[in-house]
Image (tube, rainbow, N blue to C red):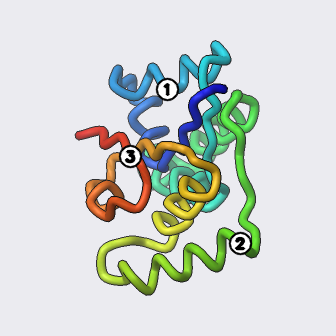
């Protein structure tokens, strides 16, 4: 069974910036060695942050690359929403709602989170690979 990883928004930013620490996760997804996932809400987070720096058209190009990559983009559903809301109550002062969805997905689908957000790792809610920037 392939390992499952769910990617946070910051991971894509690092990948497109050429960061070697995250390159292996994307490369391994292309090679079929792992299953890589990203939630729609985390993709939106990446897009608006990328657009703020490089402009909307550049962000749409990256969006197209991501959509056509082996990264599986996951929509939100009732089960994830309920768990994300529970996590947001518990960690209201340290996690964004997007982070709560990320953790909810990792827990439900036994995926390891890959993130640049230390707060996600500190919760201990799901196995996490922290990438220091």
Label 2 sits on a secondary structure element that is helix
- First along the sequence among labels 2 and 1: 1
| Up-down relation of residue 82 to residue 10 (above or below) | below
**Separation (CA) of disc 2 from disc 1:** 27 Å
Please name whichever residue, 57 or 46, is drawn nearer the observer in this view of the structure: 46
In the rendered image, residue 28, in percent from the top left (x then y), is placed at 56, 18
| Up-down relation of residue 5 to residue 9 (above or below) | above
| Up-down relation of residue 106 to residue 125 (above or below) | above
Mark 1 lies on residue? 25
Label 1 sits on a secondary structure element that is helix
Mark 3 lies on residue? 128
Tag count:
3
Residue extending farthest to the front is 1
Q: Residues within 10 Å of mark 3 (few under 14, many from 20)?
A: many
* Position of the C terminus by quadrant: top left
The dot on residue 79 is 2
In the rendered image, residue 98, in percent from the top left (x then y), is placed at 51, 66
29 left or right of 15 in image: right
For the point 43% across and 40% down, the residue is 11
């Amino acid at each position: 069974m392939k390992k499952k990883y769910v990617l946070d928004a910051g991971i894509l930013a690092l990948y497109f910036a050429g960061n070697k620490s995250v390159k292996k996760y994307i490369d391994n997804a292309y090679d079929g060695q792992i299953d890589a996932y990203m939630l729609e809400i985390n993709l939106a987070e990446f897009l608006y942050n990328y657009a703020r720096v490089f402009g909307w058209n550049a962000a749409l190009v990256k969006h197209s690359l991501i959509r056509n990559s082996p990264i599986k983009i996951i929509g939100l559903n009732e089960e994830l929403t309920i768990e994300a809301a529970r996590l947001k109550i518990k960690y209201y002062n340290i996690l964004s709602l997007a982070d709560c969805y990320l953790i909810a997905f990792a827990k439900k689908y036994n995926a390891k989170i890959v993130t640049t957000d230390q707060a996600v790792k500190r919760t201990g809610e799901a196995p996490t690979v922290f990438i220091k920037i």
